[in-house]
Image (cartoon, coloured by chain):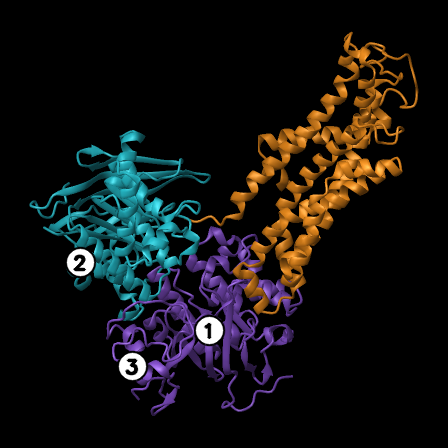
Chain colours: A purple, B orange, C cyan
Amino acid sequence: MMRFNSLKTPLVQGINLTKIFRYGLIWGEPVEAVKNVNINLLRGASLSLTGESGSGKTTLGKILLGIIRPTSGKVLFNGIDLTNPKRVPKYIRRMMSYIPQHPEEAFDPRWRLYDNIAEPLRIHKLIGSKEEEKEIIFKLAEDVSLDTSLLNRRPFEVSGGEIQRAVIASALATNPLFMVCDEPTSMLDISTQADILRLLKNIRDKLNISLLFISHDIEIASFMGFKIAVMLKGRIVEMADVDKLINEPLHPYTQGLLGIVKVEYVSSYAKNCRGCPYYDRCPVKMLPCREKEPKLKNVGGDHYVACFRY
Amino acid sequence: MKALSFLGIKGKIGLIIILFVVFIGITAPVISPYDPTSLFEPFEPPSSTHLLGTDDVGHDVLTILIYGARVSILVGFATATISTFIGLLTALIAGCYEGLDPIISRILDFFLVIPRIPFIVIISAFLTPNIFIVILVLSFFGWAKTARVIKPLVKQVYSREYVKRLKCIGAGNWYIILRHILPATFPLAVAQFVLEGGHAILAEASIGFFGLEDPSTLSWGMEINHALQKSIIFLTNIWTWVLGPPILMLTITLLSTTFISIDLETRINPRLKVRSW
Amino acid sequence: MSHVSDTSKEVILSIRDLKVKFYTEEGEVTVISDVNLDLFKGETVALIGESGSGKSILGHTIIRLLPKNANVSGHIIYKGIDLLKIDSSLLRNIRGREIAWIPQMVGSSLNPTVKIGVQIGEVLIDHYNYRNQRAWSSAIDLLKLFEVEPAEEVAKGYPHQLSGGMKQRVLIASAIAARPNLLIADEPTKGLDTIKKTLIVNIFKKIKDLKPDLSILLITHDLKFARELADRVIVMYCGKVIEINDKNSFFELPLHPYSKLLLKSLPSKGLYPIPGKPANVANPPSGCRFHPRCPYASDICEKSSPPLIKLDLNRCVACWLYKR
């Protein structure tokens, strides 16, 4: 039986997480996908991660879900250690879900949408009879505004927006406490995008789910509200409440993403660098930026920046 | 049945032929005009009593043909079943357990390099192989080919996003393998099954043709072997009923398995792609 | 009905009464109907629409890359030739040299067994009879222009050695190598993050600088991208053209209700979703195809489909709200 302590105890905790990938057997060139990241996610709160592709957002999300093992650091889910994916107990998995970027790949293409949505329930043996299952699936479909006549179809027979709704329904099936949405709308049309984003926001508010929302589009990431963290080359370079970050962005990279400052594109690979990860593109770099890496500092009111200018 | 709509013209023709051969094999004692051990006058031309005449020893050719079907089907089916079962299992394990893949690949390479028929030649130096030994040896090397073909598909499906998602929500490895990966490999496994069956039939016939089999085995290959031993058959038209029928049966059986597996494989590849529009 | 907005500009491509049907298992589906539009020399046009609008198919039709079960009627006139009526040898001459195509699937569009330099240079060898040496050095120049460095090494290498972004730049380079007059790009920013999108915008701006009289047709559903590059905007919905407008005029004062709602669904404008479900081109609504979702719909909208009418020199719309 799990006891949820006071609301102050974070539901998901990432402590000093680092993940280094080694590409190629012979070269073995190490790539720092995530470096020294600390995350605290309270029950019912939501955190948006933004940054260009290759910045480590997806990897961080997968580490927090306990499906990738970090090279160093710890992941705690309500006190339970998720650091080793192989040792995660099955009942913990019931409390989390994952919505991937490509909706058409999230489901088994040979199964009907109905079975795909019901699968989490079947894996955890949460329901007794077929009738009970049908009732639950239909209710879930209604919650996500998915036409129930489509439940008998296969993924390739429905549109991207409809599949994404089904994926969300499946994610909600086990009443999870923690949900990671990895670029859920980047493959969808603009108008469908608006629909899905509003749906996710409603769900989060109604069901009090802790949400980790990943998007390379900073405007979409900020729509979800609460806190937002900007990642670059595996590090968090700025983190604050959404309103604060959008109105007073401090880090030059955040300013670049918001279009306030021009960004020059060089490379997105997280190569090991000695100084600030933004050094090669920063328009306002200073002398110390090259040698030392700035640490994440609280500059007032829970607004953190990793930059020597502050 | 879904399988029937799966096949095109080629596949359907192949299926009809192979089912016909299977039927003959199963009902051999019933439909065969004579008991296979009974002997008559050798080299009798086709007549009303012997529809396909008699061979060099005096067997009724039609009887031998029917019983030969039995042998071929048995060898083909048994070898295909064992090879596919073991090969599929190996492919699933190698594809889903990263750590075991290198070792299994090396083992597969070893088995793939050794040619089956010369190996039987060596075995026959020590004992005269009967059907079961033939099946054993053919399966012993056959599973590697099936495993080799299916493994990449297993790996591809295992790396799909939905598998990662399922692992994330708590599905065990074997649950994923049995309920998602295995069904995905099914069409390819069936195609391999048919193909392997055809190869096994040909291999068995070759072994019989080389005269390596137990002489009491009534296979098409042995029949061809016997027929060719008497060169007199080419001086007259005896060869048309002694040599012709077994060769013809062998050919159409192999063609049928080839048709089916080609048809299946051409339908498998487009099916794997998700339709986009 | 002519939609020439400025008689001093030269028309480079003229589409008249275009209709594209597909024969499928479920029957005949008309995916594009009654398309009439002109493209001018030197302009960049954004062809905007969502999935099912037919914009991608329109692009494929111009370059005649449709599957076998397609049936096309109408006219696509390029330099006095109807592209739909010519034979394959003349088509081959036009493709690559006159009209170039940048496909959506970057990964599978380059030949994995041919060197990059050859793939870029082969258009020059085919269409302009360059010698191999000259084609090779032109390829290297193009790679340098698009900042694919080190250019000489890349030219000698193969596609699998490049990242996705570099492959896309190579694809674009090979498309413009033969200095075509019309460039059609199919969703060049699909799935890209903001920084990469800026890169693509810069590349297209560079291409325009290289050849100012190049006409570009951008097929996209990314409105921000369209805003950066386009001179004119054409909006499609459910197989029909519903608005043609100047870029600035479109973003400030969109004409068609769909355009208005589409702009409102952008993150920067509040992410207001368009009510209802997107129309299915296989089973379209009666009358105006947008009427079930339109906040301004009236009786006539359900009964009859509005024609594309010209409001003034640069603007056309297909909506019963507007009288000529």
Residue at position x 35%, y 57% in the image: C166
In the figure, is residue C177 to the left or right of A189?
left
Q: Residues within 10 Å of mark 3 (few under 14, many from 20)?
A: many
Q: Nearer the viewer, mark 3 or mark 2?
A: 3
- Tell me the subunit letter for badge 1: A
Residue at position x 81%, y 29% in the image: B208
Q: CA distance from mark 2 to mark 1?
A: 43 Å
> What is the residue that sits farthest to the top in this orientation?
B236
Q: Is residue C58 visible?
A: no
Q: CA distance from mark 3 to mark 1?
A: 25 Å
The location of residue C314, given as percent across then percent down, is 12, 52
Q: Is residue B81 visible?
A: yes
* Residue assigned mark 1: A32
In the figure, is residue A146 to the left or right of B232?
left
* Residue assigned mark 3: A249
Q: Secondary structure at mark 3?
A: loop
Q: Residue A290 occupies which quadrant of the picture? A: bottom left
* Residue assigned mark 2: C247
Q: Secondary structure at mark 2?
A: helix
The location of residue C242, given as percent across then percent down, is 23, 51
- Tell me the subunit letter for badge 2: C
